Image: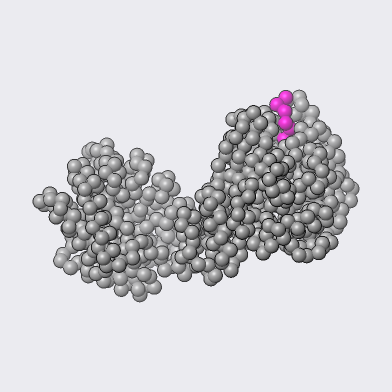
Amino acid sequence: MPDYGHPLRFGTFITPAAAQPQNVVALAQHTERAGLDLVTFQDHPYQPAFLDTLTLLTWVSAQTERVHVSANVHSVPLRPPAVLAKAAASLDLLSGGRFELGLGAGAFWDAIEGLGAPRRTAGQAVTALSEAIDVIRSLWATDERRPLKYQGTYYSLNGAKRGPAPGTRIPIALGAYKPRMLRLVGEKADGWLPSQGYLGPGALQEGNATIDAAAVDAGRDPREIRRMLNVSPPQSGDAASWIGELVSLAAEDGVSTFILAADDARLIQIFGEQVAPAVREAVADERRDRGTVAGTVRPAAALALRREGIDYDAVPEGVEAIEPGDASFPRVRSNYLRGGNPGLVLRPRDTAGVVEALAFARRQPVPLGIRSGGHGVSGRSTNDGGIVLDLTHLDGIEVLDEATRRIRVGAGARWGEVAAVLDRYGWALSSGDYGGVGVGGLATTGGIGWLVREHGLTIDHLRALEVVLADGRVARASETEEQDLFWGMRGAGANFGIATSFQFEVDEVGPVGWAQLVQAPSDLAEYLQRWGEVVSGSPRDLTANLIIGRSSGQTVATVMALVDSDDPDTILARLQPIADLAPLVDSSVQVTAYAAVMGNASNEPHQGQGEPLTRSVLVDALTPEVAELSRQLVESGTSRFFQVRSVGGAVADVPPDATAYGHRSAGFSIVAFGSDAARLDGYWSRLRALGSGLYLSFETSRDPALLEQAFGAGNLERLRELKRRYDPENVFDGNFPIDAGAATLSA
């Protein structure tokens, strides 16, 4: 039989003896120290002298660092597959991807029946195992949002919630000997795991042939299935003959995982330090002589999910690539609000990797999205069928100079993480209002946050940044280097390159007052106008946001406000005029750290669905006209989420032409979420006419006529010149792209 080319692995098969539990764990740790790859335990819950295998696997994974763990194999009749799926995914997540799932159809039926499980014939047991595999994999498929309904002969689920999703693709190996079980291996499993002592002459060859034929019939490549074998030490104890036997099993019978069945620390040491290296070297020589292609094979089912136009085989080495079909793909396909289905997500680990990834992406005739945190309301950091260049790994946060409060932050960091680091020094940086937002997106657009009225926009604290340009050059932009690029990156950065790191000068900020007030205004238009007057007339140490909604036919206003002071009297003095505007339904006021305010983010993967519909406008004031239109919009039910953010203050201290973000006179940013574009735009066109611009991060319309509102006519002309200079081919076209050759369009 051919060598299937899998990388060789070596492990141990240890008896889970309850009489000496610490010895069992010690042998597992010894397995790791000996350089072996895998430690396994049999699963016979009916044996009173054995530890429970799932509990043991959990404990061993916590007591080791590198070695993989698995049952050899789980008795499925005694392990309900829905519960086993959750346990397996949990172990995978807790161990950092070191869990493997070994399954068996069941044996010793008297003992199984004695524990209350039903007795099954051999045929019934195989069918039940096949159903169990389906149930387990379906429960891991969390990208499918609907609860799982499954009706089999032996297992049924009626609306089971999926998850958790494993962090890696957990391989499923089956202990199999008879033809029907072998065919099941070929149809559904990732590995075949028999014991050498139970195999007669020629059984490996016959088993491989049966598995391969079943795999082909199921549309699979037989090389997807790893051939594993529990082996015993040689009777003679001669390492040389042992090595020769294993080399033959690898080269002639395709075995690539050898698991030593022994509870002897000395034999484990020999196996790891002498046998395994020698077998690896000899098999590598055999493969070179035969021209065997070594490596793992992507499953046919995953290959079928690849998208046209992407040369997957040319992905740069060293850049993490996540494809449809990979276990981690559901966690990276979408962003916070928008559902996506890209053909490939690339995660470079440094700036050089970004250069390589961008060069690769440019050669593919598919859309390109750039992602830092993936939270953007506009939803432009994912796509359908294209490439997403994800900066997650560029997440370093470094203090460069304590005296000047200069820091460097990677574009893939998130603002909650930044706030936590700065808090140790008594510092903070105004940076949005949600800690899960990525640094790169916000720091190239503007940055309206909880300290904005006192300390300005995030971009006002930017002193330098590193940018990968469309042609692959790496530029440093600052007030003294690439000054034009530095100007454009502060407000329209997504058009010119991929910012990989930022240098900021941050502020000294101690404990702050943080308040949430829920009010029930009787006249929303009057309330909005007065709220705007109170906020804009307050000292700059107050920044407030307002969310308006409808509940049971009543208008509800939720005010969130930050006061940059730890003095209770000052905090209450700032809040009282707001509290007096309408009856209070609920309230909460506390003194806390800015980092705690920004610690509001979930670490759960983004699971956006569909296309978000949002509209943005910047207004100088909440005039009676703005307030009345806002009231009509909210009370009509057109907007399910209506928010007003205060700006003004320190933002207006910067000249409008100092950065690409030019709407410095605006006192408020208004955003509305809706589900009917025609209805929403019916109101919004009138609001835009009363506004002074819009904020890119909160706008989902792709109408190029909005560019002038986004940047202002003067800034837009300068940005077009920069687009011609830095991205003439419009490589970066996914996020409010500026047409370098177009004339100025009016809104």
Vertical position of residue 199 compared to residue 645: above or below: below
The part of the image, by quadrant, that contains residue 228 is bottom left
Name the residue at 46% across, 57% down: 317
Front-lying residue, 724 or 594: 724
| Location of residue 134 in the rendering, given as x and y in whole percent from the top left corner | 40, 63
State how the image is colored.
one colour
511 relative position to 128: left or right: right
Residue farthest along the right direction in this orientation: 624
Task: Give the position of the N terminus as an image quadrant.
Answer: bottom left
Residue 703 counted in the magenta span? no
The residue shown at (51%, 50%) is 349
Q: Is residue 715 above or below residue 299?
A: above
Of 650 and 557, nearer the camera is 650
Q: Is residue 523 visible?
A: no
- Residue shown at the point (49%, 61%) measured from the top left: 315
Residue 730: x, y in percent? 67, 63
Tell me what residue is drawn at x 71 percent, y 43 percent: 479
Q: Is residue 566 magenta?
A: yes
| Quarter where residue 560 is shown | top right
Please state the extent of the stretch shown in magenta in the rendering: 559-567
x and y percent of residue 726 in the render?
Answer: 68, 57
Q: Position of residue 103 (x, y in %)?
A: 32, 57
Q: Quadrant of residue 366?
A: bottom right
Tell me if I can see residue 395 in this picture: yes
Image quarter hosting the C terminus: bottom right
